[in-house]
Image (spheres, coloured by chain):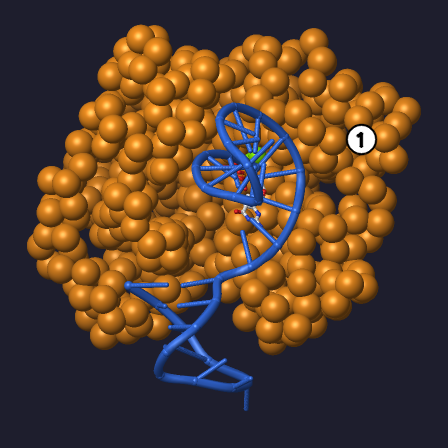
Chain colours: A orange, B blue
DNA sequence: GCCGTTTTCGGCCCGACTGTTTTCAGTCG
């Protein structure tokens, strides 16, 4: 799939144009096109073939031609040409906090600064303060910015972000001047990775709140501090933004601070169309505020039904809201069982019984204990004899715990040729079989595609687990032909997993939405290796929600007797 | 560069904080 390539090329163009001082709206056009193509739940090549590129919002005559060129040649002449105008290192300078396109351009033109190393040298030498509009303070800030730039962390996974946010909320809500407090931003939208923690507070005493916020024990630097908005950096180099507003603006501010930016812009454009003004304080008709206290009334004032935070990405939610066609999103309470977990039989840290007990606490009706297969020796894969013993133990547990159905399964390795690690004779005896790739990640897309299709075609494979292999921070998702793969899944009635492990969240939101559109059923699992991991189901559910999935799209929302796995029983 | 139930040209979201400026531009959210 070339979606990511097209998106990357447009993003690169936008960055170069920024430094060149191009028209801001032209730059936005490239950024918008890049994002819209990246989040497309479809292969961009299909749009080329069907001559439908212009149906994609933000794609007009010019970008249509550029996309065609990229899809057919794998690159874009226009970008190659632009790259010759601007030294590569200059783009990196934009990542130094406090330095934007204007400053980068000035530094390049006046001091021939071409990368961060040169920038640091010039700042140390005191050369920057002499430029127009710059001073000593600016120079200091640039040096501090470079230090931060060097320590820039990767985006946080959802679990870490949730914990950091909870820590700040717990400390801040103790202040008696805090009335309401909510995490916002990408965390509230439950995006799979989060850059910073955004927290909204309502209070009548903003000054006091900000004094407290910027002096909390975890705070290392104060990036900015005002009565309405402050930013700090923690000792772990995580940025936390806080906004404080009055009660009457809380809904408007929550809407603003939840975003996404693209969603906000659409909202504001819609307001303009209605002759209104929308900002983080409310919706205004002339000077009069007509909404602001709750998000619901904000949406209503624009003629929209309430849009769940997970959908606020400008991925069609406005059109759906206006038509009354928003999905009834799946909820954590809808989940009736967890079909992928490990025990001490392989590389899990808790016994099967401990996993069962925790699952019952969560109210599950069924679980599948799916330890690794024989070939995965480092992960303690089970041989034939061990499988027999494990089966017996599961039978015993099923007798002992009548309130939950325990399925005997395995996460069977799909080898580099697409063959399964157990013969059919063994798979036949299992209640549930999960196929998963653990090696050969670097194979070309066509090979991976064939492997997964072959696994789907095995009549005992019920689910493909962590289908794209991504591990946040260490391994990118491998590419495959999703159209082909999902077609095979549909034909063979094989479900695809949303793996709830925070580093995985695989399928992701976009791929899950693609799966739904292809008619493929989804299973949300935790892949727990410890009993406490069973709690991570909420992260997988968040991915499903961001993918617009409803209860009926998810197999493990069904009670056991209705569980529609192929060949079950 | 895109887009159009008032437009095919002239708009394109809106505001807080900072440093440098003597009234605002740049950056960021
Ligand atoms: N209207 C408007 N709102 C913005 C803009 N930039 C950011 N916001 C709002 C929406 C964002 O969700 C919210 C928080 O900004 P962040 O930069 O932290 O982005 P967000 O949390 O969405 O993603 P992140 O994971 O932090 O990169 O502020 C903007 O340019 N205009
Ligand atoms: Mg954020
Ligand atoms: Mg932020
Ligand atoms: Zn597993």
Query: Visible in this render: residue A40?
Result: yes
Provide residue A529's location: percent of width, then percent of height: 51, 21
Query: Visible in this render: residue A455?
Result: no
Provide residue A558's location: percent of width, then percent of height: 62, 53
Provide residue A281's location: percent of width, then percent of height: 74, 51
Say if B11 sits above or below A258 in the image. below
Say if A194 sits above or below A542 in the image. above
**Label 1 secondary element:** helix
- Residue furthest out toward the right: A176
Q: Quadrant of ligand 3?
A: top right
Q: Is residue A109 found left or right of A553 in the rendered image?
A: left
Residue A171: quadrant of the picture: top right
Tag 1 residue: A206
The residue at the point 60 percent across, 73 percent down is A273
The residue at the point 73 percent across, 21 percent down is A213
Q: Residues within 10 Å of mark 1 (few under 14, many from 20)?
A: many
Q: Is residue A567 found left or right of A252 in the rendered image?
A: left
Q: Is residue A204 found left or right of A10 in the rendered image?
A: right
In this view, the residue in front, A195 or A340, is A195
The residue at the point 35 percent across, 20 percent down is A130
In this view, the residue in front, A257 or A227, is A227
Provide residue A85's location: percent of width, then percent of height: 14, 40
State which chain disc 1 sits on: A
The residue at the point 58 percent across, 54 percent down is A264
Q: Is mark 1 within 8 Å of ligand 3?
A: no
Q: Is residue A10 found left or right of A371 in the rendered image?
A: left
In this view, the residue in front, A475 or A551, is A475
């Amino acid at each position: 799939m070339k979606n990511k390539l097209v998106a990357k090329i447009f993003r690169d163009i936008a960055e170069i144009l920024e430094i060149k001082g191009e028209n801001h709206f032209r730059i936005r056009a490239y950024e918008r096109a890049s994002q819209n193509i990246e989040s497309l739940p479809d292969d961009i090549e299909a749009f080329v073939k069907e001559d439908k590129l212009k149906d994609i919002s933000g794609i007009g005559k010019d970008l249509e031609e550029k996309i065609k060129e990229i899809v057919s040649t794998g690159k874009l002449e226009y970008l190659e040409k632009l790259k010759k105008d601007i030294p590569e290192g200059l783009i990196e300078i934009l990542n130094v906090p406090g330095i934007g396109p204007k400053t980068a351009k000035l530094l390049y033109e006046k001091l021939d600064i071409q990368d961060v190393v040169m920038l640091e040298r010039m700042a140390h030498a005191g050369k920057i303060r002499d430029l127009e509009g710059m001073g000593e303070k600016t120079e200091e800030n640039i040096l501090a910015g470079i230090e931060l730039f060097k320590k820039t962390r990767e985006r946080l996974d959802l679990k870490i972000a949730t914990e950091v946010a909870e820590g700040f909320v717990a400390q801040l809500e103790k202040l008696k001047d805090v009335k309401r407090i909510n995490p916002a931003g990408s965390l509230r939208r439950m995006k799979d990775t989060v850059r910073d923690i955004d927290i909204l507070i309502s209070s009548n005493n903003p000054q006091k709140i900000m004094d407290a916020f910027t002096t909390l024990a975890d705070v290392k630097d104060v990036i900015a501090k005002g009565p309405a908005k402050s930013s700090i950096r923690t000792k772990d180099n995580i940025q936390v933004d806080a906004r404080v507003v009055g009660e009457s603006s809380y809904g408007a501010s929550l809407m603003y601070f939840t975003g996404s930016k693209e969603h906000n812009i659409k909202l504001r454009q819609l307001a303009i169309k209605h002759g209104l003004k929308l900002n983080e304080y409310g919706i205004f008709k002339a000077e009069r505020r007509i909404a602001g206290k709750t998000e619901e009334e904000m949406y209503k004032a624009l003629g929209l039904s309430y849009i769940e935070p997970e959908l606020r990405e400008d991925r069609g939610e406005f059109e759906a809201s206006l038509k009354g066609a928003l999905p009834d999103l799946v909820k954590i309470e809808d989940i009736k069982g967890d079909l992928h977990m490990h025990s001490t039989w392989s590389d899990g840290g808790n016994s099967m019984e401990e996993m069962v007990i925790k699952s019952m606490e969560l109210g599950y009706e069924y679980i599948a204990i799916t330890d690794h297969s024989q070939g995965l020796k480092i992960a303690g894969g089970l041989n034939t004899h061990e499988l027999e013993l494990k089966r017996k133990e599961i039978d015993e547990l099923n007798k002992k715990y009548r309130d939950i159905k325990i399925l005997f399964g395995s996460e069977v390795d799909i080898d580099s040729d697409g063959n399964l690690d157990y013969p059919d004779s063994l798979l036949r005896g299992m209640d549930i079989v999960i196929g998963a790739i653990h090696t050969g990640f670097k194979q070309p897309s066509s090979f991976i595609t064939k492997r997964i299709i072959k696994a789907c075609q095995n009549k005992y494979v019920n689910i493909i687990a962590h289908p794209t292999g991504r591990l946040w921070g260490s391994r990118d998702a491998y590419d495959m032909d999703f159209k082909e793969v999902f077609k095979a899944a549909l034909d063979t009635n094989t479900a695809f997993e949303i793996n709830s492990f925070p580093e995985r969240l695989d399928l992701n939101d976009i791929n899950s939405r693609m799966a739904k559109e292809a008619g493929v059923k989804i299973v949300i699992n935790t892949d727990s290796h410890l009993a406490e991991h069973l709690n991570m189901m909420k992260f997988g559910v968040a991915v499903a929600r961001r993918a617009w999935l409803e209860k009926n799209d998810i197999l493990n929302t069904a009670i056991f007797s209705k569980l529609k796995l192929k060949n079950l029983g």
